[in-house]
Image: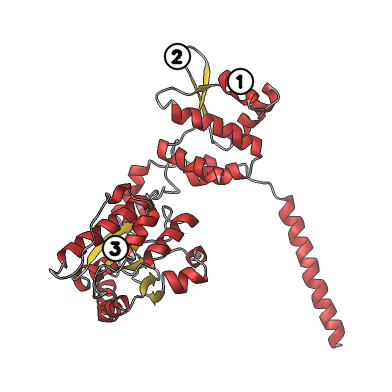
Amino acid sequence: MEGNYGEDEEFGFARNYFIAKELGGSGKKSSRKLSDIELVDEQELRAAARSIESKHEKEIGSLLNSYKSLYPKWVFELRCGFGLLMYGFGSKKALIEDFASTALTECAVLVINGYLQSINIKQAVTAIAEALWDQLKTRRTPSGDFPKVQQPFNSRSMDDLLAFMDGSHSEKNDCFVCVVIHNIDGPGLRDSDTQQYLARVAACSHIRMVASIDHVNAPLLWDKKMVHTQFNWCWYHVPTFVPYKAEGIFYPLILAHGGTAQSAKTAAIVLQSLTPNAQSVFKVLAEHQLAHPDEEGMPVNNLYSICRERFLVSSQITLNSHLTEFKDHELIKTRRHSDGQDCLYIPLATEALEKLLQDISQ
């Protein structure tokens, strides 16, 4: 009896499954598309977001105050050569800046906002070296040897800057610069080369690092050596439940009308799914747009001539198929030139277009 009951139950599940599939397939499919949604203006949406009243402010304030008891421990760990990595739900910007302003008064503090869309890592490292130089000058002793700067920091190579920050400039190794990085997993710092440089900076003897992460996959940016030897992280779960107001302002809103402001990241993902020849055709158009920023676009005939010379296309039909694919993904747009020709252009800002070319060239 028990065997028959199990078989009947299994048969019932299978029968119900096929009945549900049949009923679901017979229904009329909706013709609505995501692109049919009437998106609001971005400024209007951001204004509405700013007007939302904050909730549980008293509880959040109490939670942030409770973390102040950890400040002495954090300072001690920094002095011992560790780095501090904050994670947990909510913006940790105010917490880290409060810690830096109240507990790190004896050292120079330099802040990097990793949530920005683009960051020049060379400029950031140069600023850190200059901050260390100023710190060393204030602690100069009459008898102590003091290094002489032979060359301005902004004209030095990355290796020279890192060697300076890792040098033995004082008898006591208590002179250091604390680098605060909000969102070390942010879009401007997320590439492998930048993370390698940050790890090398953190490993310098006169540098200490305090950083925050918010992306669930942020630890995948680092290997074992970077985590345990270079960054030397002490991990702290410090949920704050504070809204990401400062960090979120630089991200495009999903429900806002983006117009031509398409992100370079999205474009790179689309391009990487296309053929190498299609990518090369796009590069020709992008390089022309960067070289001639004042022009309305690149005439189709000119694009065809260059692509034909570089053996990227064999006919106008092949080029048209690539252009159709670009237009379907909204990678390019067309506008009429003053002489009546149709010109192609990429609806991205110059900085975003340069970043896109770097991404697809890797």
What residue sits 52% from the left and 65% below the top?
220
307 up-or-down from 183: above or below: above
Viewer-side label of 3, 2: 2
Residue bearing the label numbered 1: 305
Identify the element where label 2 is drawn.
loop
352 up-or-down from 139: above or below: above
**What is the distance, in whole Å, between disc 2 and disc 1 at their CAs?**
21 Å
Residue bearing the label numbered 3: 54
Residue bearing the label numbered 2: 338
Q: Is residue 114 visible?
A: no
Q: Amino acid at mark 1?
A: Ser
What residue sits 45% from the left and 39% below the top?
354
Instruction: Identify which residue, 226 or 111, lies in the foreground.
Output: 226
Q: Is residue 152 visible?
A: yes
Instruction: Identify which residue, 14 or 56, lies in the foreground.
Output: 56
Q: x%, y% of residue 46?
A: 33, 48
